[in-house]
Amino acid sequence: MEQGYKRILVVDDEENARIALSRILTHEGYDVSSAKNGVEALNFLRSKNVELIITDLNMPEMNGLMFLRELNRHHPASNVIMITAYGEVESYLEAMTLGAFEYINKPVKYDDLKKVINKIFKTI
């Protein structure tokens, strides 16, 4: 599969962070969509498939862990990277237990994120 056909969904309530990450990933050749929270992301996923979801932990309506639980119920094979400005051991352990591929603290270092994305796409 060519890189340009790998679809990524960015889920973050912080508009500037969502737009910046989406632009960087689009510039790298990925097909990127975005959602401002877990509810919007789940609605998007009802009609479209993605190979990777990058989601924030702290969001209104449905936080990243609640979103991950719903993904497990409806899209159990999802590849997820959790990002957060509030890294805590408890949320890290829960995210990993729920199947997150990686847990990255903000501010996101793009080179680190790129390595994780490449690792995920090599396995699918």
Image: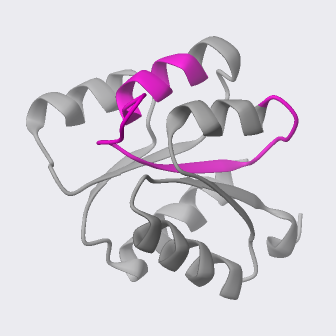
Q: Position of residue 113 (x, y in %)?
A: 43, 69
Magenta stretch: give its range: 46-71
Tell me: residue 6, above or below residue 63. Answer: below
Vertical placement of residue 65 versus 52, above or below: above
Picture coordinates of residue 21 (x, y %)?
A: 51, 73
Judge by depth and name the residue closer to the eye, 65 or 43. Answer: 43
> Which residue extends farthest top?
73
The quadrant in which the N terminus is found is bottom right
Disc count in the image? 0
User: In terms of depth relative to the viewer, which is nearer, 62 or 85?
Assistant: 62
Q: In the rendered image, is residue 63 in sight? A: yes
Residue drawn at x 32%, y 71% is 108
The residue drawn where x is 81% and y is 28% is 46
* Residue in view at x 34 percent, y 22 percent: 97
In reply to whether residue 10 is colored magenta, the answer given is no
Q: Is residue 28 left or right of residue 60?
A: right
The answer to whether residue 49 is above or below residue 108 is above
Identify the residue shown where x is 44% and y is 36%: 100
Question: Is 60 covered by the magenta stretch?
Answer: yes
Please provide percent x and percent y for residue 80: 52, 42
Pick the front one: 38 or 27: 38
